[in-house]
Image (cartoon, rainbow, N blue to C red):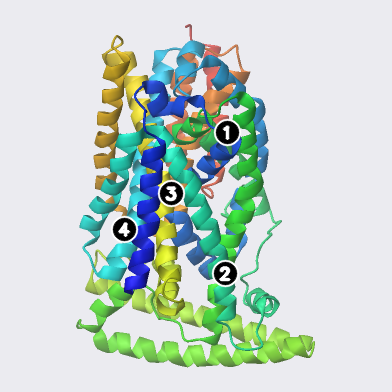
Amino acid sequence: MSVLDWSVLVLTLLGIIVYGVVRSRGSNSMDDYLLAGQSLPWYHVGLSVMATQASAITFLSTPGQGFADGMRFVQFYFGLPLAMVVLSITFVPIFHKLKIFTAYEYLEDRFDVRVRTLTSALFLLQRGLSTGLSIYAPSIILSTILGWNIYWTNLLMGGIVLVYTVTGGTKAISHTHLQQMAVVTFAMVLAGILTVKLLPEGIGFVDALHVAGKAGRMNLIDLKFDPNSRYNVWSGLIGGFFLQLSYFGTDQSQVGRYLTGETIGQSRLGLLMNGLLKVPMQFLILLVGVLVFVFYQFNPSPTFFNKQETDRLKQSSYAREYQLAEIKHQTLTAQRQKAVADMQAALQTDNEAGQETAGTILRETDDALKSVKTDVTNLIKKNNPAADTNDVNYVFLRFVLDFLPHGLIGLLIAVIFSASMGSIASAYSSLASTTVIDVYKRLVRPEGSDEHFLHASRWATIGWGIFCIVVAQFANQLGSMIEAVNILGSLFYGVILGVFVVAFYVKSIGGKATFWAAILAEALVVASWYLDLTAFLWLNVIGCLLVVGIAWVLQRFLKE
């Protein structure tokens, strides 16, 4: 990185942090610290909700997902708009009218303290672990660029966010989110435009999409119903709906964002704004990854995108084997470039037979290149058993560093950092509020002054920050971060949603039946995932239905 890149990076991040801290001055009560005094307008709420969900994982791993697997991941979000409508009608007015700090307070009024504690504990476990992944993702950047030790980088990344979260609370988080989303949108659009500009002369945006389509990367819609397929319309609409409903309706990191709305109407508008903009945003980010894929059809691509690991391999006893793999990769790359040129000529002359032939060669070459990458991955693993051998998270970062102009490199890395800061800060805040309100205040010290619980919230934020940083130290073995974080959520969100569905809609079921149903359902969901019985998105549906069904059966036999 040049001096210009570092200047853009530091000034962008410093401006966001200072703005948030300055705008949050006066957060001296629990209501201000945890809910920003419930004073924010709808656009603040909407952007804060989006920024909480859009972590560094979104901007590191999603373009890599588009590069490796095409556009089909966008189907994951198809259930989101419907989930926002349901939440606006049901959850939002109930939470606002009860004037609660966390979603789980409602469960004690509806059931009992056992259900409230169990559900908040499931949330704390899931959110604490997934926040560790959110810290690890941007740490990859500094580690790759500067050669820093990943463990110290995790400590630095998690610690920076902890400073302004402890200082300013939810109000600081919401104000920084506003700036973060503006920077993110501008930078990603600019990255997409410049990627097309880097393509050979005569290859425009439409031509790039044709090449991507023939290579199997424009697989936007899959109508086939297959429970074992991770991404299709049905898993997105049904499984995605349940996941998003649980995430936005029962995860305190999101509930805490829309409870900051000045009125019920402002919170509803904020959620609907998120429902309308989130799918196009994910489409854009995936499309950037697909355009990077097209760029590498015309230009030599790295055999493995994690440069740190390939540099180690060159100095190892496996250097000769790696060199042979590189030669094979270069040969296949030349074949691919010729096939792409033939494809372009066939497209310009409407030669369908030529398009089909070139497309077949492209797909065969793609498979052969994947085989070479597998060989290199095995060498890396032999040389360093602790190495991160899934390079999906490095594709976009490597492209940015190698080909985009200085200044924009700094801005895009600032985007990834600021997105990470937004989601991590929201997670810290939600973990602290749930710990203090649902555990400490309810079970340990029911009586205390507002000032005491404010101090307790700050100490809880620090404690969870340390826990999440520790989790980040073990995150490098989980593969694609965007998939890992959603798999982790799917293990818990369906069960948590099931508890709230019973609470809202099945008034005949009591606390004891719901408590034991949640425990049994969670065990069955984990077993289903461990045995790989279905794609992970369906675990959200399974978990929710199991809680409702088991609770209904148990209610017939258990007495409250």
Q: Quadrant of the N terminus?
A: bottom left
Q: Which residue is mark 1?
A: 41
The quadrant in which residue 96 appears is: top right
Q: Earlier in the sequence, mark 4 or mark 3?
A: 4
Q: Earlier in the sequence, mark 4 or mark 2?
A: 4
Q: Residue at x 78, y 89 (%)?
A: 351
- Mark 2 Cα within 10 Å, few/some/many (few <14, many 20+)? some
Query: Mark 3 is on which residue type?
Result: Val
Q: Earlier in the sequence, mark 1 or mark 4?
A: 1
Q: Which residue is mark 2?
A: 192
The label number, if any, that marks residue 139 in the structure image: 4
Q: Which residue is mark 3?
A: 485
| Residue 44 location (% of width, % of height) | 54, 39
The label number, if any, that marks residue 433 in the structure image: none
Q: Earlier in the sequence, mark 3 or mark 1?
A: 1
For the question of whether residue 450 can be seen, the reply is: yes
Q: Residue at x 25, y 30 (%)?
A: 459
Which circle, 4 or 2, is nearer the viewer? 2
Q: Disc 1 and disc 4: Cα gap in Å?
A: 33 Å
Instruction: Using residue 130 as the reference point, say whether residue 107 is left or right of it.
Output: right
For the question of whether residue 532 can be seen, the reply is: no
